[in-house]
Amino acid sequence: MSRTLVVVGNGMVSHRLVEAVRAEDVDGAWRVVVLAEESRPAYDRVGLSSYVGNWDASALELAGSSYDGDELVELRLGDPVARIDREAKVVTTEAGFEQAYDALVLATGSYPFVPPVPGRDLPGCFVYRTIEDLDAIRAAADHARSNRGRAAGAVIGGGLLGLEAAKALRDMGMSPHVIEMAPRLMPIQVDEGGGALLKRLVEDLDVTVHTGTSTSEIVEDRERLLAKLGNGTELDLDLIVFSAGIRPRDQLARDAGLDVGERGGVVVDDGCRTSDPAIYAVGEVAAVEGTCYGLVAPGYTMAEIVAAQLAAGNTAAAFPGADLSTKLKLLGVDVASFGDAHATTEGSLEVVVNDAVAGTYKKLVVSDDSTTLLGGILVGDASEYNTLRPMVGSELPGDPASIIAPAGGDGGGIGVDALPDEAQICSCNNVTKGQIKGAITEQGCDTVPKLKACTNAGTGCGSCVTMLPKLLTSCGVEVSKSLCEHFTQSRAELFEIIAATGITTFSELIAKHGSGSGCAICKPAVASILASIAPVIGADGHILSDDQAGLQDTNDRFLANMQRNGTYSVVPRVPGGEITPDKLIVLGEVAKEFGLYTKITGGQRIDLFGATVDQLPHIWKRLVDAGFESGHAYGKALRTVKSCVGSTWCRYGVQDSVGMAVALELRYRGLRSPHKLKSAVSGCARECAEARSKDFGIIATDKGWNLYVCGNGGMTPRHADLLASDVDDVTLIRLIDRFLMFYIRTADRLQRTASWLEELEGGLDHLRDVIVDDKLGICDELEAAMAAHVANYADEWKGVLDDPDKLARFTSFVNAPGTPDPTISFREEREQQVPVPLGIPAIAGAEGSS
Amino acid sequence: MTMTDARIWTAVCELARIPVAAGVAALLPGGEQVAVFRTTGDEVYAIGNIDPIGGAAVLSRGIVGDAGGQPVVASPLYKERFDLRTGECLDGDASVPTYPVRVTDGVVHVGSV
Ligand code: SRM
Ligand SMILES: Cc1cc2nc3c(=O)[nH]c(=O)nc-3n(C[C@H](O)[C@H](O)[C@H](O)COP(=O)(O)OP(=O)(O)OC[C@H]3O[C@@H](n4cnc5c(N)ncnc54)[C@H](O)[C@@H]3O)c2cc1C
Ligand code: SF4
Ligand code: FES
């Protein structure tokens, strides 16, 4: 007979508990019923702020949280538990649903504390805890913007979550205020010195900080809010977010007569049992031996302890205490605090290095004989956190001051070797250095992914991932930079080999420097290098030349982008997005003639979809005759240089952004690179071309151009960094030539400029040394390589149309040229043809022409 | 009658038409599509042209190479590799049919029933 486990709440900890019970309960002894207040399954609350911007709640889903297909788990959403009847062992929900239990777990988390400020209930006042809270804040911001063009917001509370909320407001386009009662920001984690620097760094980011004062009153003022601060300041606002701490949601337990702590929280012993042996509490609501933990990792530990007792019969499982160390990037500022950060240990000493110029504050707390590390605080640069935190409690390898001294050798003063085996590397999943070493030496984990799979380290917040390659190296495992199983070299190394030896074919390269016959990773990578280098070494530049055609990714092989049904899209180049009416008409005519679906792309040009392999040359013949050329939408190459209308038309424009965009697009068209390259030119600081989201972006100034590099839209957006300001046309182009060639030579395969810069040793400063100041003395070479590219450019599509051998490859069937592929069919949607996926019958009468 | 006798051999193209380490698509009499590949070592293989994972007739346009020495093609849609000898997918739970191939007088023939 199975027993019933009822879990109240479906937050992160509840989810971990259910997963752990289901994993350990091999005989299916427990049926699990989860009763939840929120209307969606458990989600990643820790990552809540990432919801801002993409507003995609599905990205916060936790794996397996719907328990689909597991008959032993029942999840009831949107109906909170109202009562526990301990005598009858039954809980009742607000809607009146009754559920009997054999064991009950309270996982109700916390609620945001809202201080009793008059006016705190006014519309426009919010808290920051759930997806719904963020939706409401967003709606208020949008509403304010639509009324007044801009919204103003403040966060009450300058702790960790308050600063996170401030960032969210900033990401919504506001310049937020933060009001903190304590004399400094993040009072729990940092000390006075660290707080002072943190305030300065945060204020540089357009956040106004009011410390040492509280909010005395909030009043309504012409549909807006007026916040009156204790120090006399008054702020005109559209919205206010309260983030003044959290309180455990222990009301259910109180009503049921369970013991609660002095400062709230359901009192539990180290096995997470409440004063009623049938009831447990885990996560933020639990006060383990008097302490509530506001972090997810201790909650996970509690969940596992309860699961071990219930499902694995391990009654000895006990909460070992928790590490409250934190490291985070708030508004782009590194902050870390670990161990006894405030030096409360008797006789402890503090060693502080406060570097106002570099904007870093570092403090170590050590034992009275200054040998043992007790804790520390890092602000501005927390790169040493990963090695320092696990050292807490053990002997330091050297003089504490030298460890945090500025420019102390190669960054971080101590290496992983100095850590003891018991040092905890991954605090999310409680994995020690010893366990990771064991996985490397005994279980043969020789890559980071294998280590993650084997030990779970690095699978939580991810902050410890950088430690894993270091541990691999320290165990003597060479962390492979090899491109694939056929080449032990990295892409950059292969580039150097090809440049130095002048090898021009893949077969020669793999015979001399690799093994086997190649694969879908190394072939396109080498093809890209050969194409980048061809003009310099005088090789056949056409990517479909005999010995290169087979290396190219499908898109390159047919000079078009393959679509889901095996047809292709056609994207002619429209430099700078500028196009004549005549050319527009040609595009329309071609689309009509071949029955192609037409769409304006995000890259300021026009995409024609649904061409079959054999149609491609006929379509391109028409386009080339009309003066179009390949847009390289298929290639790891320059895509588009977008432009805004600029000074020619726009009343704000200060330079001819269209002219510059056209010039740049024509200069770099056809340039093959490790990943695609995108650019944009804006005519003034209003930035209508979104240049700062590009690999290289240019923004006009009164005096010339500002050049920004290494931006990215896409999956991980990154704002481009300013490389040079107010430069003239000639300097601008020279710098871009150098930048692009340097990237092409040194980046990994499929690494865009943004991630390339992030991994480049020395970062932007180093890049500036190389590109602007020519400290490596390679700029002449880089410029010459670009000059060769520009001189040798030829349109790839024209090259195909002029060559019968290349043309012959564009057939659907070698033995039946001209026969349409029977698996391709179309239906009509919004007056255009769209593909019918294989296996779904076409609607009779709606089939396309091919 | 033996199996071999019942087989229909379709002439696909001259071997030279298939670039080294690449593939072409061909139509069989029954309307099936095959992808015919020539490896670096000049072996010829034929497998079904439809990628069962992506659901489109595109395998002939994939990159040909090897995985630990076994000849494979990577689907151009989502890059899963298929063993050219067995049709088994190395990266997922799927497979494609395989067809016998013979080269006579420089012409590639694919056998089907
Ligand atoms: C057609 C277009 C969407 C549209 O209808 O507007 C498009 C379509 C595709 N994009 Fe895109 N992207 C298009 C603009 C963009 C933009 C906007 C822009 O360029 O200003 C972005 C964000 C900017 C950026 O790249 O930083 C964008 C970010 C991506 C990404 C993510 C890149 C990243 O670094 O995270 C991918 C995936 C990848 O490249 O790995 C991608 C990949 C693709 C692919 C190649 C996916 C695929 O393999 O099939 C799509 C095929 C295009 C085709 O078949 O023609 N597309 N894609 C746009 C073509 C622009 C053009 O004229 O060339
Ligand atoms: C913006 C933000 C950022 C954070 N960042 C971090 C971080 O970087 N690192 C970190 O460690 N922690 C962070 N936290 C804290 C972390 O999210 C929590 O520690 C963790 O979610 C606690 O999990 P829990 O399951 O105990 O509570 P919760 O996740 O709060 O789940 C409790 C659930 O119980 C439900 N509930 C309450 N009462 C009832 C009832 N009577 N009946 C039914 N259901 C009920 C609630 O609706 C809620 O869904 C952050 C929190 C926030 C809000
Ligand atoms: S960026 Fe400036 S010049 Fe260009 S369109 Fe916008 S406002 Fe006008
Ligand atoms: S510390 Fe968070 S994943 Fe390891």
Image: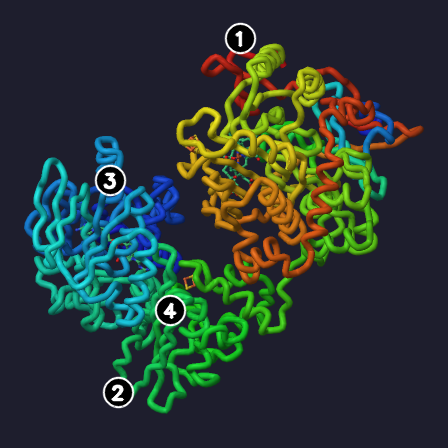
- Out of A430 and A581, give the one closest to the viewer: A581
Count residues near mark 2 (Cα–Cα under 10 Å), then give few for <14, some for 14-19, many for 20+. Answer: few
> Of label 3 and label 2, which has the lower sequence position?
3
Q: Are marks 1 and 3 on the same chain?
A: yes
Q: Which chain's residue wears label 1? A: A
- Secondary structure of residue under mark 1: loop
Residue A172: give x, y in percent of width and height: 31, 42
The span from disc 3 to disc 4 (Cα, nearest Å) is 33 Å
Q: Are marks 3 and 2 in contact (CB under 8 Å)?
A: no
Identify which amino acid the numbered label 4 is placed on: Ala
Q: Quadrant location of residue B1?
A: top right
Q: CA distance from mark 4 to mark 2?
A: 30 Å
- Image vertical order of residue A92 relative to residue A849, above or below: below
> Which residue carries the number 3 mark?
A151
In which image quadrant can residue A487 be found? bottom right
Q: Chain of mark 4?
A: A
Depth order, front residue of A834/A726: A726
